[in-house]
């Protein structure tokens, strides 16, 4: 049998690449090797609807159980790839088995960064990434009255909102002086933090965790400065570490991810990388790696097309979303390093848009409960549109404001 396409990783990028390859007519054997226990899932609901108990398990899976067999995709879960032998064109599994490839796709994503403080190894500290980790947290919060969430990043803020909605008193601890400082201006973080405070979420900003204590089980978080926060439940959302070890050991070029070209080809032309681990050239944003659901989906789709014989460049404006209580947050574009922002609407009405300006061009747009003009904002970011003060006027549609 010809060695075919081997995909390492069982997340959204992997599943979507395999699906698109088949739907676009690819006929080679496809094998997905995934360290996960479960078949590929959408991770966003794991901190939101599914964790809250408002979404069924079936909706969390990327594909139905029968999809893989029907599409002649061999999905091997609980299968960890330990090494890549580029000379032999094989991957080596943790048990020693070798699997040959003609084309290798790396879609190994990321894992939660772990706390590095005394007591961090006590049982009762939760991290979120896999379906199982969400299910464990769901079981644990049923009996909890008070939670401490360490980290006010996306996952931390989403979990704090979910647990609060389930009646658990949450305190969020964050080392930075405010939430999401690299990607939102104070007008946004002030608004969201106030929104949370009105819903009884407490914050401790600008302070780190010193230790976690408890009698055989994590029971309290001690902050620098000595404050003690008792907790029935501790959730850590302190960032993610890219799973680039395999690629690194194989000698591929690594620089904040696996360096790939616009077709996702790594420094070895037989090996591609997609999803969270890919460091790719973006026409508008420059070289990037993005840890977003939409990025994994669209990179998987684009690579699937290329492998099926229709070489496709990745030309896609970055997008991410989050849901925080009843706030629907949507961001298009490239927010980091903005020079200025334009606020369109009034945060006190809980519906507004923030336009990020860099070099006097529209660089990104953050919509809070305000996605009516989503497509227009995407067009303006893509066009690197020079800004106009009329963009602040809610009575003028964005495309009109710049015409
Ligand atoms: C709780 C949570 C909530 C999120 N919410 C949002 C959101 O609201 N909006 C948004 O835009 N993004 C969100 N994200 C981010 C988004 O889910 C990720 O960007 C996306 O899952 C990345 O997909 P991926 O396929 O690249 O990697 P992953 O989904 O991380 O999949 C990687 C896979 O590789 C496997 N693997 C790793 N190493 C090996 C190995 N050596 N051998 C075999 N298999 C291996 C892993 O087991 C896993 O199956 C969220 C992420 C999490 C964890």
Image: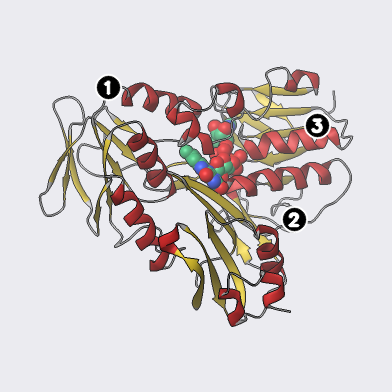
Residue 108 in the image, given as x and y percentages of width and height: 58, 39
Q: Residue at x 66, y 26 (%)?
A: 98
Is residue 243 something that shows in the picture? no
Q: Residue at x 26, y 44 (%)?
A: 200
Q: Which is nearer the N-term, disc 3 or disc 2?
A: 3
User: Relative to 353, does residue 303 appear above or below in the rendering?
Assistant: above
Label 1 sits on a secondary structure element that is: loop
The answer to whether the beta carbon of the residue marked 2 is less than 8 Å from any atom of ligand 1 is no
Give the quadrant of the C terminus.
Answer: bottom right
Cα separation, mark 2 vs mark 1, equals 46 Å
Give the quadrant of residue 42: top right
Callout 1 crowding tier (Cα within 10 Å): few <14, some 14–19, many ≥20? few
Label 2 sits on a secondary structure element that is: loop
Residue 332 in the image, given as x and y percentages of width and height: 61, 60
Which-is-in-front pick, marks 1 and 3?
A: 1
User: Relative to 144, does residue 86 appear above or below in the rendering?
Assistant: below
Q: Which residue is mark 3?
A: 4
Q: Residue furthest left?
A: 226
Q: Residue at x 82, y 52 (%)?
A: 312
- Which residue is at the front of the view, 3 or 345? 345
User: Relative to 373, does residue 235 appear above or below in the rendering?
Assistant: above
Q: Which residue is mark 2?
A: 314
Callout 1 touching callout 3 (CB < 8 Å): no
Residue 143 marker: 1
Label 3 sits on a secondary structure element that is: loop
Callout 2 crowding tier (Cα within 10 Å): few <14, some 14–19, many ≥20? some
Which-is-in-front pick, marks 2 and 1?
A: 1
Residue 2 marker: none
In this rendering, would 304 be left or right of 392? right
The answer to whether the beta carbon of the residue marked 3 is less than 8 Å from any atom of ligand 1 is no
Quadrant of the displayed image that contains ligand 1:
top right
């Amino acid at each position: 049998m010809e060695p075919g396409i081997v995909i390492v990783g069982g997340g959204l990028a992997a599943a979507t690449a395999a699906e698109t390859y088949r739907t676009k007519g690819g006929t080679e054997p496809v094998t997905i090797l995934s360290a996960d226990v479960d078949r590929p899932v959408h991770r966003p609901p794991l901190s939101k609807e599914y964790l809250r108990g408002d979404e069924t398990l079936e909706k969390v899976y990327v594909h139905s159980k029968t999809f893989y067999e029907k599409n002649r995709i061999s999905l091997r879960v609980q299968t960890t790839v330990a090494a890549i032998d580029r000379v032999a064109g094989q991957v080596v599994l943790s048990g020693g088995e070798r699997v040959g490839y003609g084309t290798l796709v790396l879609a190994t994503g990321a894992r939660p960064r772990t706390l590095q403080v005394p007591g961090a190894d006590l049982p009762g500290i939760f991290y979120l990434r896999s379906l199982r980790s969400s299910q464990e947290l769901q079981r644990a919060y049923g009996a909890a009255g008070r939670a401490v969430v360490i980290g006010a990043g996306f996952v931390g803020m989403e979990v704090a909102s979910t647990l609060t909605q389930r009646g658990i008193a949450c305190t969020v601890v964050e080392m930075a002086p405010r939430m999401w400082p690299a990607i939102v201006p104070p007008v946004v973080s002030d608004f969201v933090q106030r929104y949370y405070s009105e819903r009884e979420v407490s914050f401790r900003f600008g302070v780190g965790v010193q230790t976690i204590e408890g009698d055989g089980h994590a029971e309290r978080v001690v902050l620098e400065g000595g404050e003690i926060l008792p907790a029935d439940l501790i959730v850590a959302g302190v960032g993610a570490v890219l799973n680039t070890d395999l690629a690194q050991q194989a000698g591929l070029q690594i620089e904040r991810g696996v360096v790939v070209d616009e077709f996702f080809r790594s420094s070895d032309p037989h090996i591609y990388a997609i999803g969270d681990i890919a460091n790719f050239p973006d026409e508008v944003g420059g070289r990037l790696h993005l840890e977003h659901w939409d990025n994994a989906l669209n990179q998987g789709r684009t690579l699937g097309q290329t492998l099926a014989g229709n070489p496709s460049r990745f030309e896609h404006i970055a997008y991410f979303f989050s849901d925080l209580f009843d706030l629907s947050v949507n961001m298009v574009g490239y927010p980091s390093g903005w020079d200025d922002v334009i606020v369109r609407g009034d945060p006190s009405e809980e519906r507004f848009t923030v336009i990020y300006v860099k070099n006097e061009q529209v660089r990104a747009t953050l919509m809070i409960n305000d996605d009516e003009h989503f497509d227009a904002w995407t067009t303006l970011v893509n066009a690197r549109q020079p800004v106009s003060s009329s963009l602040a006027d809610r009575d003028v549609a964005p495309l009109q404001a710049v015409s």
